Image (cartoon, rainbow, N blue to C red):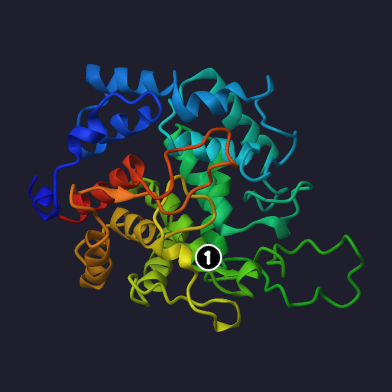
Amino acid sequence: MNWLAKLNGDPLPWLLEPDPANPGVRYFALRDLLDRPADAPEIRQAQADVMLTGPVRAILDAQEPDGHWSKPGAGYLKYTGTVWSVVFLAMFGADGRDPAVRRGCDYVLDHSRARAPYGGFSAMMELYPAGMVQCLGGNLCAALIDLGWRDDPRLIEALAWLARSITGEGIVPADEAPPRGTKSGEDEAVRYFKGGNSGPGFECAANSRKPCAWGAIKAMLALSKVPESARTPTVLAAIAQGVDFLLGRDPAMADYPTPDDRPPSRSWFQLGYPLGYVTDVLQNLEALIALGRGGDPRLSNALTWLLGKQDPAGRWKMEYTYNGKMWQDVEQKGEPSKWVTLRALRVLKQAA
């Protein structure tokens, strides 16, 4: 493992130790850093441990019998609603075969998608198409693929919308008025809305209708999980567009478009776990490397930045946290983080 030579120390024993507070770290380290096969006894035991203690157990203990969390419906409530509970279950390594996990995923697929012919995930309680944003769509599509729902027709529809929302295929601009004489409720065009994703190429109302890199990264992470053999021409076009956008600026600087041309958010440069709609330089690396761009020289500055953030023991700190907002706190802000270190090592291994 030559990539370990770039570290100030070897954090692998730390990540592999039993840790009832964060059992998912050991599971992912065995799988992603040591390449243990899925049927290896230690992998099977590690994932079984994930279901017993730590954040996955806390999330499942808060689930209602029908599969939702906090409040019935679309479930966007930050960060204990149904949407975020499912996203975090995947991030913490939950076993997608578990009946309670499956109930939660099934509930999201039935209650969090906008009406046909859209099919994308909406943040709005009434599931208006205007509530579809790529950060939400990317997070949920990625989580549901990780939890074993890739072949479900409802997820296939959501992935298709995610790709189309990027390319603009068959979608009417938000500012284009319906044909003259069209009465209220008769406009059947599939269109962008001034709220949510407001145009192709990652345009989003939350970013003053400019291309949003946070949404782009979440979308690219989701599409990277679609096997190459299953990528439609629209998915391939969306990936190409996303890679071009994210590599159009130096990922280490993260100087992507912002409202009122403000400087990049500080969140770009504060590493944490789990990640909600906010992103960071490391997640940009995760997305681009997952799409096969690990050898692109345009990533070199970001990789150098990442290596520069390790401590003398080869560990990374938790700098951004949702503690106090989730079903259970995860590690401690300002202290060395197993989760952030795991993220960093994955990227360094894949880039090597």
Residue 215 place in picture, x, y as percent:
52, 61
The residue depicted at 27 percent of the width and 26 percent of the height is: 38
| Residue 130, above or below 67 | below
**Occupied quadrant, residue 179:** bottom right
Q: Is residue 73 placed above or below 5 in the rendered structure?
A: above
For this view, does 153 lie left or right of residue 216?
right
Residue 3 lies, in percent from the top left, at 12, 51
Q: How many marks?
A: 1
In the picture shown, does residue 199 fall above or below 327? Answer: below
Q: Looking at the rendering, in which quadrant would you find the N terminus?
A: top left
- Looking at the picture, tell me which residue is in the foreground, 270 or 286: 270
Above/below status of 181 relative to 93: below
Q: Quadrant of residue 104?
A: top right
Residue 28 appears in which quarter of the rendering? Answer: top left
The residue under label 1 is 166
202 and 319: which is toward the camera: 319
SS for callout 1: helix
Image spot of residue 80 (x, y percent)? 63, 38
Amino acid type of the residue tagged 1 in the rendering: Ile
Looking at the rendered image, the quarter that the C terminus falls into is bottom left
- Residue 23 screen position, x and y as percent: 36, 27
The answer to whether 348 appears left or right of 229 in the picture is left
Q: Is residue 153 left or right of residue 222?
A: right
